[in-house]
Amino acid sequence: MISSIRGVVERKGEDFLIVQVGGVGLKVFVPTHLLEECHGAGEEIRLFTHLYLKENDIALYGFAEEEELNLFEMLLSVPGVGPKAAVALLSYLSPATLQAAIAQEKCELLTRVPGVGPKMARNIIFHLKDKVETAAVPAAISVITKADEEVIAALTSLGYSLVEAQRAVQSVPKDVTDVEERLRLALSYFASQR
């Protein structure tokens, strides 16, 4: 198996990178946030990888962090979850948020990811809840409150990605409980990032 690669980015595609490794260009499917962080051709990159083999399908999936790779492989262990759905989940949800959503049985957060319906979300929670709990969801992960869910929904409806919305919500002080005020502060977070 190919557990990691280090090479130079040759080009970026819609959902993949071509990484030049020892004279060979490898097509590696990656989460959206990794594509956004990659500056493009010529950048050196190291990816933790999973070689996916199925009857007529061979693909290489890459992740910046080992934790993401582990979550990807856990998601693949769920019946009905393929690599595209697993990458989509890791594209829209940070590893910490994904683990918290599973541990707290937040189906509605998982179904915000394109391609993940209620049935798949319930299936993921059913199969991984114990695994995520035994892996001890980090204490730094705060409970996803109803107010946070509303703010994230509002931000995603405005066109922000789920990961961007989560970062903005995490920047809001926890003592602010009013939804409108939390939304205002989350929007001011985006303004400060420009």
Image (spheres, helix red, strand yellow):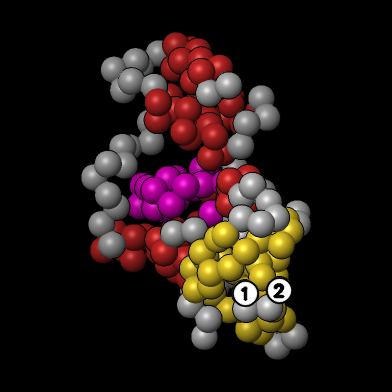
Determine if the magenta segment contains residue 193.
no
Note whether residue 38 is visible.
Answer: yes
Determine if the magenta segment contains residue 103.
yes
Q: Which residues are magenta?
A: 85-109
Residue holding disc 1 = 21
Q: How many marks?
A: 2
176 left or right, relative to 113:
left
Instruction: Give the vertical position of 92 relative to 182 (above or below).
Output: below
Residue 63 image offset from top left, x and y in percent: 52, 62
Q: Secondary structure at mark 1?
A: strand
Residue 100 image offset from top left, x and y in percent: 37, 47
Q: CA distance from mark 1 to mark 2?
A: 6 Å
Callout 1–callout 2 Cβ contact below 8 Å? yes
Instruction: Give the vertical position of 102 relative to 182 (above or below).
Output: below
Callout 2 environment at 10 Å: few (<14), some (14 to 19), or many (20+)?
Answer: some
Note whether residue 75 is visible.
Answer: no
Residue 123 image offset from top left, x and y in percent: 51, 62
Quarter of the image holding residue 19?
Answer: bottom right
Residue holding disc 2 = 25
Residue 161 image offset from top left, x and y in percent: 61, 37
Residue that appears at 48% across and 77% down: 3
- Residue type at mark 1 is Val
Q: Secondary structure at mark 2?
A: strand
